Amino acid sequence: MKPVELPDIYDALQRYPSALTAIFTAACVEMLEVSDQTQRIRWSQEGLRVAQQTARAWEAAVEYFRVSPKVFRVLNASQFLRWVDTGATLCHDSPTIAAAFFRASPGTLLNLHPRHVPGWANLGHGLFRDTWKSSNLAARFFELNPDLTNYLTFRELESFGALV
């Protein structure tokens, strides 16, 4: 079996809109600064996994590739993989929510301990009721989190999420 290389991932991503391959290419350059070859392969495979989940999952993958070099600087390797898994789980239910989760992550993770990432994701996912309105509400919750976590502890954020 031939080992997977970045060009293989790039080729697989080309069946999606060009925005995905463009952001992947730019992110590859950024990842050169913060990761080794093995980590970049795994990083790219995870992005492809996100893109392959549903018809519009490529939109979440765009956000994943766009922000992941920043997130990679904040989280260690196992925390990073847990973050990706969390986003992929959200993507399975709603690419819109997953895209918002990924997009909000760099700002939120500056104020949120990595152990709280799954709980943070569950707060947003808990707002989702399989409707477009609840999907928009959950996405908006994630979009506000970089600002909210400047002022709220995780416990306070949980209370806020329960209130919403």
Image: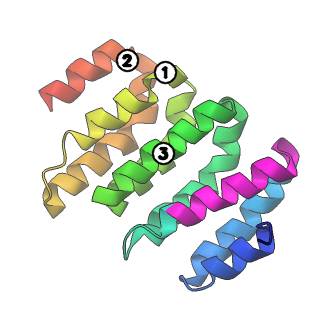
Q: CA distance from mark 2 to mark 1?
A: 10 Å
Where residue 11 appears, as percent x and y from the top left, is 70, 81
Helix or strand or loop: what does disc 3 sit on? helix
In the picture provided, is 56 more to the left or to the right than 62? left
The span shown in magenta is: 33-49
- Up/down of 107 relative to 57, above or below: above
* Circle nearer the viewer, 3 or 2: 3
The residue at 31%/22% (across/down) is 157
The residue at 27%/33% (across/down) is 123
Mark 3 closeness class: few <14, some 14–19, many ≥20 residues within 10 Å: some
Q: Is residue 112 visible?
A: no
Q: Nearer the viewer, residue 43 or 147?
A: 43
- Which mark is on residue 85? 3
Mark 1 highlights which residue? 115
Q: Please tell me whether the stretch drawn in magenta is mainly helix, strand or loop.
A: helix
Question: Which image quarter is the C terminus in?
Answer: top left
In the picture provided, is 39 more to the left or to the right than 111? right
Q: CA distance from mark 3 to mark 2?
A: 20 Å
Please tell me which of labels 3 and 1 falls first in the chain.
3
Q: Is residue 67 magenta?
A: no
Q: Nearer the viewer, residue 35 or 96?
A: 35
Mark 2 highlights which residue? 154
Task: Looking at this view, name the residue that lies furthest to the front.
Answer: 1
Q: Amino acid at mark 3?
A: Asp
Where residue 115 appears, as percent x and y from the top left, is 49, 21
* Circle nearer the viewer, 3 or 1: 3
The residue at 38%/73% (across/down) is 56
Q: How many marks?
A: 3
